[in-house]
Image: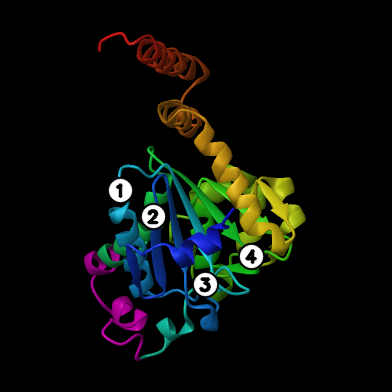
């Protein structure tokens, strides 16, 4: 059976630019970071490509796998962003800082879009993470619903150490996974979180040897596809909203979702 990495190579890409490749095989889409020479460092162009990948997903897709070529998942933001010249054809971060509030807010909003579509209600996203996942790389892994990590993984949130904050939609899932106190400690110290701690705190669903990462993701993907799609969608919506509902409100939501499922299974209304 082909691995996700082999599938990504053999399938015809629906998108392949700026360090991002999207391939689609019926119910499974694979988004691959393709700049291992720079440890998949991120840039505004890469973020726009990630956003485009999300928009290109056909309706057949149920599971999206996020993976990266090379030894590192992503070493974070390309440091060129902090130079006076920035990236070719892009305003430098220093130029953005000197601009108006509305322009700066709109630019960061655009960047965040690359990190927000992974939790859409109609898909389940799985990040396969090896090596370094630092800063923006950590936040990209956090953008997904599930994380399978290699035993050499190193998560780190270095923004605070640089005088910045994590602003790519990573703080909400981080607190949800590990709690406020541990999230603050991870961000404020910038320390690395390794595989054992990641699994123990809920950051990762499972850790495996690096050589087994693709196979583990493939097994998880197959298990996710085994359940009926509408049941997965309803269950995901229930779990995502549970933290914002009271106990009684969650009971109401469960009853409503189950009523929809029972009627669908019974063919009522067709």
Foreground mark, 4 or 2, reads: 2
Marks 3 and 2: CB-CB under 8 Å?
A: no
Disc 2 target residue: 24
The label on residue 130 is 4
Q: Nearer the viewer, residue 87 or 227?
A: 227
Q: Earlier in the sequence, mark 3 or mark 4?
A: 3
Question: Looking at the picture, how far across and down is residue 117, in whole percent?
Answer: 37, 50
Q: Is residue 206 left or right of residue 128?
A: right
Q: CA distance from mark 4 to mark 1?
A: 28 Å
The local crowd at label 4, few if under 14, some if 14 to 19, many if 20 or more residues have their Cα within 10 Å, is many
**3 to 47, vertically: above or below:** above
Foreground mark, 3 or 4, reads: 4
Q: CA distance from mark 2 to mark 1?
A: 8 Å
Region in magenta: 85-105
Foreground mark, 4 or 1, reads: 1
Question: Looking at the picture, how far across and down is residue 247, in whole percent?
Answer: 52, 18
The label on residue 58 is 1
Q: Earlier in the sequence, mark 4 or mark 2?
A: 2
Question: Looking at the picture, how far across and down is residue 30, in whole percent?
Answer: 45, 57
Q: Earlier in the sequence, mark 3 or mark 1?
A: 1
Marks 4 and 2: CB-CB under 8 Å?
A: no
| Secondary structure at numbered mark 1 | loop
């Amino acid at each position: 059976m082909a691995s996700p990495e082999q599938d990504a190579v053999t399938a015809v890409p629906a998108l392949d630019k700026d360090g991002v490749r999207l391939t689609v095989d019926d119910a499974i889409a694979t988004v691959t970071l393709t700049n291992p020479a720079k440890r998949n460092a991120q840039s505004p162009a890469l973020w726009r490509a990630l956003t485009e990948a999300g928009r290109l997903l056909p309706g057949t897709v149920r599971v999206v796998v996020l993976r990266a070529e090379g030894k590192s998942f992503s070493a974070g933001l390309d440091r060129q962003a902090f130079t006076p010249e920035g990236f070719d054809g892009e305003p430098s971060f220093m130029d953005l800082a000197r601009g108006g509030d509305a322009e700066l807010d709109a630019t960061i909003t655009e960047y965040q879009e690359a990190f927000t579509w992974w939790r859409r209600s109609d898909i389940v996203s799985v990040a396969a993470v090896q090596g370094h996942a630092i800063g923006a790389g950590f936040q990209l892994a956090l953008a997904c619903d599930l994380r399978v990590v290699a035993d050499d993984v190193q998560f780190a949130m270095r923004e605070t150490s640089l005088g910045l904050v994590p602003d790519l939609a990573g703080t909400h899932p981080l607190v949800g996974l590990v709690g406020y106190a541990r999230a603050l400690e991870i961000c404020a110290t910038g320390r690395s979180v390794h595989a054992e701690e990641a699994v123990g705190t809920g950051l990762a669903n499972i850790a495996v040897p690096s050589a087994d990462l693709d196979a583990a993701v493939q097994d998880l993907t197959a298990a996710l596809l085994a359940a009926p799609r509408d049941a997965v969608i309803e269950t995901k919506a229930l779990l995502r909203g549970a933290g914002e509902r009271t106990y009684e409100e969650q009971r109401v939501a469960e009853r409503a979702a189950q009523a929809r499922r029972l009627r669908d299974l019974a063919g009522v209304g067709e």
